[in-house]
Amino acid sequence: MPDSYLPPILPCSTCGGREQKLESCLPAGRRHELWRVACPCGCALTQWAVSQGAAIRLWNRFLGENREH
C-alpha cells in the first residue's frame, strides 16, 4: 500500500513524540508480515495487525481510548 493511502499516526500518549515507526514481523508458518506501530520511547502495542493501515488504526484507537480515561 502506498504511503499516501496510510492514515496519519497520532502522537504517542506516553512521550508526546511523533517519531513512531511501523514494525513488522513474520512469525513461523505465516506468508504475510504482521505490523504494529512503535515509538522510540518504548510504547508499542502488544497486538499486531495484518496490514500497515490496520496497525495505524489500532494505534490511533488505542491512543483515543487512553486519552478518554
Image (cartoon, rainbow, N blue to C red):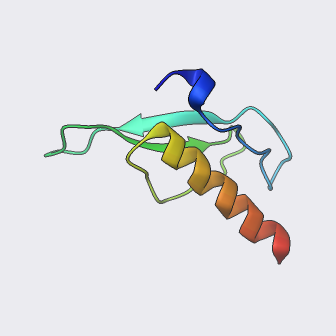
Residue located at (13% from left, 46% from top): 29
Residue located at (73% from left, 70% from top): 65
Residues 36 and 7: in front is: 7
Q: Residue furthest left?
A: 29
Residues 6 and 60: in front is: 6
Residue located at (72% from left, 43% from top): 41
Q: Residue furthest bottom?
A: 69
The image quadrant where one finds the C terminus is bottom right
Q: Is residue 11 toward the left or the right of residue 50 in the image? A: right
> Which corner quadrant of the image does residue 22 belong to?
top right
- Is 56 located above or below residue 60 in the figure? above
Q: Is residue 16 toward the left or the right of residue 7 in the image? A: right
Count of labels shown? 0
- Does residue 44 appear anywhere in the picture? no
- Does residue 3 appear anywhere in the picture? yes
Residue located at (58% from left, 23% from top): 3
Q: Position of residue 21 (x, y in %)?
A: 61, 33
Q: Position of residue 37 (x, y in %)?
A: 58, 43
Q: Position of residue 44 (x, y in %)?
A: 60, 51
- Is 61 located above or below residue 53 in the figure? below
Q: Position of residue 30 (x, y in %)?
A: 19, 44
- Is 66 located above or below residue 10 in the figure? below
